[in-house]
Image (tube, helix red, strand yellow):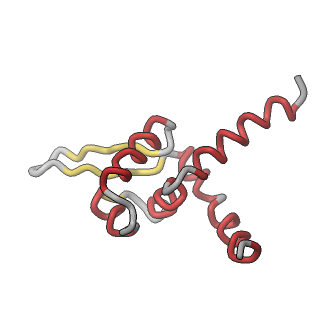
Amino acid sequence: MNDFDELCPKVWKTFDIIGKRWNGLIIYVLMSGPKRFSEIHSSIPSLSKRMLTERMKELEEEGIVIRHVIPERPVRIEYILTKKGSELGTILGPVSKWAKTWIK
Protein backbone atom coordinates (compact mmCIF):
# COMPACT_ATOMS: atom_id res chain seq x y z
CA MET A 1 0.00 0.00 0.00
CA ASN A 2 1.43 3.40 -0.93
CA ASP A 3 0.96 6.71 0.88
CA PHE A 4 -1.86 7.73 -1.47
CA ASP A 5 -3.88 4.59 -0.72
CA GLU A 6 -3.53 5.24 3.00
CA LEU A 7 -4.10 9.00 2.88
CA CYS A 8 -7.03 9.21 0.46
CA PRO A 9 -9.69 7.68 2.76
CA LYS A 10 -8.53 9.93 5.60
CA VAL A 11 -8.81 13.04 3.43
CA TRP A 12 -12.31 12.01 2.32
CA LYS A 13 -13.31 11.46 5.95
CA THR A 14 -12.04 14.96 6.79
CA PHE A 15 -14.08 16.47 3.94
CA ASP A 16 -17.08 14.46 5.12
CA ILE A 17 -16.81 15.96 8.61
CA ILE A 18 -16.30 19.61 7.64
CA GLY A 19 -18.49 19.38 4.54
CA LYS A 20 -21.57 18.17 6.37
CA ARG A 21 -24.01 21.05 6.56
CA TRP A 22 -23.42 23.26 9.62
CA ASN A 23 -20.37 21.39 10.96
CA GLY A 24 -17.87 23.90 9.62
CA LEU A 25 -19.80 26.81 11.13
CA ILE A 26 -20.18 25.06 14.47
CA ILE A 27 -16.45 24.35 14.61
CA TYR A 28 -15.72 27.95 13.58
CA VAL A 29 -17.95 29.29 16.40
CA LEU A 30 -16.24 27.03 18.95
CA MET A 31 -12.77 28.19 17.84
CA SER A 32 -13.24 31.28 20.03
CA GLY A 33 -13.68 29.15 23.15
CA PRO A 34 -16.22 27.06 25.09
CA LYS A 35 -19.85 27.83 24.34
CA ARG A 36 -23.21 26.84 25.74
CA PHE A 37 -25.80 25.37 23.39
CA SER A 38 -27.77 28.63 23.35
CA GLU A 39 -24.63 30.62 22.46
CA ILE A 40 -23.88 28.36 19.52
CA HIS A 41 -27.49 28.56 18.39
CA SER A 42 -27.60 32.35 18.60
CA SER A 43 -24.37 32.54 16.55
CA ILE A 44 -25.98 30.49 13.76
CA PRO A 45 -29.64 31.62 13.83
CA SER A 46 -30.71 29.75 10.68
CA LEU A 47 -29.69 26.45 12.29
CA SER A 48 -32.61 24.76 14.06
CA LYS A 49 -32.17 23.52 17.62
CA ARG A 50 -32.98 19.98 16.52
CA MET A 51 -30.29 20.04 13.83
CA LEU A 52 -27.78 21.64 16.21
CA THR A 53 -28.43 18.85 18.73
CA GLU A 54 -27.89 16.25 16.01
CA ARG A 55 -24.67 17.85 14.75
CA MET A 56 -23.26 18.28 18.27
CA LYS A 57 -23.81 14.57 18.96
CA GLU A 58 -22.08 13.66 15.70
CA LEU A 59 -19.13 15.96 16.40
CA GLU A 60 -18.85 14.49 19.89
CA GLU A 61 -18.84 10.95 18.46
CA GLU A 62 -16.08 11.97 16.02
CA GLY A 63 -13.96 13.29 18.90
CA ILE A 64 -14.16 16.87 17.61
CA VAL A 65 -16.17 18.29 20.53
CA ILE A 66 -16.42 17.53 24.24
CA ARG A 67 -19.68 18.04 26.09
CA HIS A 68 -18.57 19.41 29.46
CA VAL A 69 -21.09 19.29 32.32
CA ILE A 70 -20.53 21.94 35.00
CA PRO A 71 -22.20 20.73 38.22
CA GLU A 72 -23.71 24.00 39.41
CA ARG A 73 -27.27 24.87 40.23
CA PRO A 74 -28.66 24.88 37.62
CA VAL A 75 -26.40 22.46 35.79
CA ARG A 76 -24.51 24.12 32.93
CA ILE A 77 -23.29 22.38 29.82
CA GLU A 78 -20.56 23.79 27.61
CA TYR A 79 -19.18 22.48 24.36
CA ILE A 80 -15.42 22.62 23.86
CA LEU A 81 -13.27 21.69 20.88
CA THR A 82 -10.84 18.85 21.52
CA LYS A 83 -7.25 19.07 20.28
CA LYS A 84 -8.45 17.20 17.20
CA GLY A 85 -11.27 19.73 16.76
CA SER A 86 -9.01 22.75 17.25
CA GLU A 87 -6.55 21.49 14.67
CA LEU A 88 -9.41 20.85 12.25
CA GLY A 89 -10.69 24.36 12.92
CA THR A 90 -7.39 25.90 11.86
CA ILE A 91 -7.95 24.79 8.27
CA LEU A 92 -11.29 26.60 8.05
CA GLY A 93 -9.65 30.03 7.72
CA PRO A 94 -7.70 29.17 4.56
CA VAL A 95 -10.70 27.30 3.13
CA SER A 96 -12.92 30.34 3.77
CA LYS A 97 -10.37 32.64 2.14
CA TRP A 98 -10.18 30.39 -0.90
CA ALA A 99 -13.99 30.21 -1.13
CA LYS A 100 -14.33 34.01 -1.00
CA THR A 101 -11.81 34.35 -3.81
CA TRP A 102 -12.92 31.56 -6.12
CA ILE A 103 -16.53 30.61 -5.45
CA LYS A 104 -19.06 32.89 -7.08
Quarter of the figure with residue 66: top left
Where residue 1 appears, x then y in whole percent?
88, 22
Residue 104 lies, with reference to residue 49, above or below; the image says below
Please state if 7 lies on the left or on the right of 95 as rendered.
right
In the figure, residue 104 lies in which quadrant? bottom right
At 46% across and 58% down in the image, what residue appears? 26
Query: Residue at image x 33%, y 62%?
Result: 41
Residue furthest to the left: 73
Between 93 and 104, the one nearer to me in the picture:
104
Image coordinates of residue 17 in percent, x first then y, are: 58, 45
Give x and y (percent) for residue 43: 38, 69
Q: Position of residue 95 (x, y in %)?
A: 69, 64
Residue placed furthest toward the front: 104
Q: As rendered, which of 22 and 80 lies closer to the eye?
A: 22
Say which of 43 and 48 sits in front: 48
32 left or right, relative to 99: left
Q: Residue furthest right?
A: 2
Q: How many marks?
A: 0
Question: Residue at (42%, 47%) from the top-left corner?
Answer: 55
Q: Is residue 61 left or right of residue 84?
A: left
Query: Is residue 15 toward the left or the right of residue 35 in the image?
Result: right
Q: What residue is at 45 percent from the left and 35 percent from the top?
A: 61
